[in-house]
Amino acid sequence: MIALRGLRRGEAAGLRWCDVDLDGGTAVTCRQLQRRDGRLMVCPPKTAHSTRVTALDRTTIAALRAHRSRRRAEAAAYGEGYRYSGYVFTNLNGDPVAPGWLTHVFQQLIAEHDVPPIRLHDLRHGAATLALVAGVQLKVVQEMLGHSSIVLTAGTYTSVLPEVAHTAAEKTAAYLLQAAGVVPGSARRRGRAPARRGRWGRVAPGRVWCGAGRPASAPNRCGRAPGCGYRAVSVRVPRPWRRDRELPLPIPGWRVAKGLVT
């Protein structure tokens, strides 16, 4: 939830199962847990804008389902003393965890796997950075993080915005140049494939010709003269042409004459 969806550690600790809809793929952030005067207290989110609905990806949904199954098995194994607090992340006895405990567990995992030292809050920054690099709009990232202003989001991740801006510029230019028929990165215009030359002259790929070697004005009609007996067909003359090479005859009774079907 912190590494992929960008929750604060207090918001993750205060998440309850009633706030999570695994079938719908959403999680409501409406509270956080903070330790004050030695006691764990339920507090409102950091700002009014921090109360939000977070969309969950399939990886996070699968991880939450597996976590819920493990917690149910641990509750059954603990016995009668287990307390069902309703929180997603709890201790072995069912009580909610403190945000400081999440940081402690995270630092233990860092030491065990020999990972460069990072803070738990850096996972939240990483989620926002990856979202921006993936092309997510800045306004969507602001809503995901629960920032009160988009200026705060833009100011925090200024190092990522130039790369995102360059990607957006390339996509915009490619879309415009494609509509104009210009190859991106050059002044060359898009066009049809170059015409091929057969042994008896230039034959454009896919153009309709009649058996007399003249362009056809319409299907099954010749452009030489009205009432021409030749049937118009689409022919591509092979290159290089060999006299002993014959074109396939798709219809019985047709013959090959100078590389053109008649």
Image (spheres, rainbow, N blue to C red):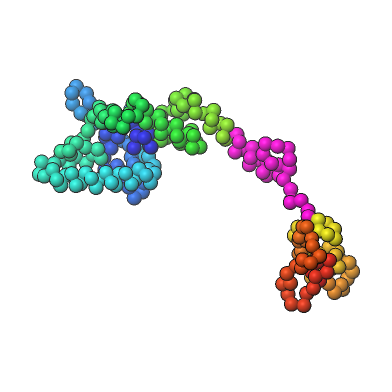
Q: Is residue 259 above or below residue 70?
A: below
| Image coords of residue 139 (percent x, y) | 47, 34
Along the line of sight, the residue nearer the viewer: 15 or 239: 239
Return the x and y of residue 156 as percentages of the image width and height. Answer: 44, 25
- Residue 183 belongs to the span the image colors magenta: yes
Compared to 257, does 113 lie above or below? above
Please state the horizontal and vertical placement of residue 110, each as a whole percent of the image. Answer: 31, 29
Q: Locate residue 70, reporting x and y percent.
A: 23, 45
Residue at horizontal 85 percent and vertical 74 percent from the top: 229
Q: Outermost residue, right direction?
A: 225
Q: Is residue 258 visible?
A: yes
Question: Which residues are drawn in magenta?
Answer: 169-196
Of residues 251 and 243, which is closer to you in this image?
Answer: 243
Q: Which corner quadrant of the image does residue 20 belong to?
A: top left
Q: Quadrant of the N terminus?
A: top left
Horizontal side, residue 57 vs residue 91: left or right = right
